[in-house]
Image: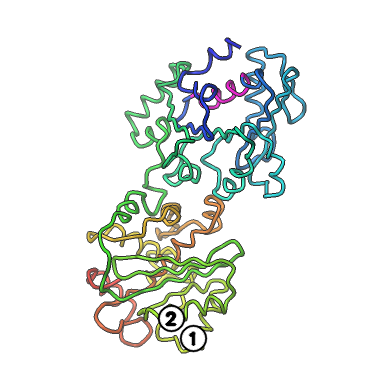
Amino acid sequence: MKQVEAQIPEAFAPLMREKYRYKFYYGGRAGGKSYAFADSLLLLGRTRKLFIACLREIQDSMKDSVHKLLCDRIAFYGLDDYVMRGDKIENKITGTRFVFKGLRDQDSQKIKSLEGVDIAWIEEAQTITRKSWEILDPTIRKDGSEIWISMNREEENDPLWVALAAHPDERTLVRRVNYDENPFCPEEIKIQAEKCRASAPDDYEHIWLGEPVRQGTTKLIGAAEVRAAFAPKMSGCSSPLIIGVDVARFGDDATVFCFRKGRWCYRFEEYHKLDVVEVANQATFFIREYQPQRVFIDIGGVGAGVYDVLKARGCGEVVRAVNFGEKAWQENRYVNRRAEMWDNLRAWLKGELPVQLPEDEELFNDLCCVNKKYDRYGRLQLEEKAEVKKRLGHSPDRGDALALTFAEPVYDNGRPKMYGNGNVTVEELFIDANANNNISW
């Protein structure tokens, strides 16, 4: 046992010596996290009977799991009290048992088999969705049970980072461990890290120091702009009220109403499992109660029915239909309306005048999660909502509702000039909006 313990760096000593509900280790390449976790679990499994679950988001086969790593470490130390039985590892003396599962394949019923787990090890935790975490966390419920987490951060809003490490409580241990703290890190790896530090500092911080990917070629909206918008600056605004309505497309999506006045977005209302008439009823109430100048409704799905009901009720002067997938107004710059609206939102956040958002981590996740690219004509294109939902575990409904408030410029000076009423062309509308940022949008 001393031979095994000697191979575990001191930074990982709390894994075996200290009691926490969550033990969260993150960092860059060659920090030794996987080896230290595997060695610690094998060592603990020789001292008493444990039920250990090794988990990841997707596990299509055993080769995707840490099964091979554990088997290699057993062979390395010559731990002949461990035996490999198919897809399980067991200790003949203590009765310790390792199982391996992919969380995306588990629902609330299937995952009940983990209720007796003593230690759950989540490997590559940066890929875990919020949905998977919300199912798993309450399932590991045995008294004294622990959840060990190892990850290389990818994004500022990685779901497990937000849930546990961003603001850890007294039951959560958070440690960053990098290659320079790993006494077993090979010299060749250190040389590669130093080369990366000299040639690509941003890559070095992500790959070798465990920092999330910086905004650049990937993200449309950066974390810094959103965090800055959360800081309190204003408590009111005289600009006209604009409401964006992102109508739920599927059963687990939310219908979200976003309220914005100029540079002050101050409220979100979220509803689940409302039918078309119920959403229209709520919109009707808001229109009568708050008298918005514009209500922009996503009609890409069942939202078309909401729009039809509101028009039939005489709200046509206020309500505008928006289809995320339709041709952009400035089609030389954007693939579709969705990219156009989100880019207007990005410009709003980065503008010279301060903006205010309600401090809301779900909104933060929505705004910072969307990846961008450009088509062969150089037009901005956003990744599909289905891809965002797969990564986040939910659709970015709040982000879309806020983006909808940028569907068309809305002016402070009287009734808005809208495209289609014969008073202004598309080109004039956008030129006017960009020239009057202080009184539009």
Q: Secondary structure at mark 2?
A: strand
Q: Is residue 2 above or below residue 427?
A: above
* Rendering coords of residue 225 (x, y %): 32, 53
Instruction: Measure the C-alpha gap from mark 2 to mark 1.
Output: 7 Å
Query: Residue under circle 1?
Result: 311
The image quarter containing residue 80 is top right
Q: Is residue 37 left or right of residue 286?
A: right
Give the residues in magenta. 32-43
* Rendering coords of residue 98 (x, y %): 69, 29
Q: Residue furthest front?
A: 143
Task: Based on the picture, tell me whether residue 338 belongs to the magenta stretch.
Answer: no
**Tag 2 near tag 1, CB within 8 Å:** yes
Q: Amino acid at mark 2?
A: Val
The 10 Å Cα crowd at callout 1, few under 14, some 14 to 19, many 20 or more, is some
Quarter in which the C terminus is drawn: bottom left
* Rendering coords of residue 39 (x, y %): 59, 20
Query: Residue under circle 2?
Result: 319
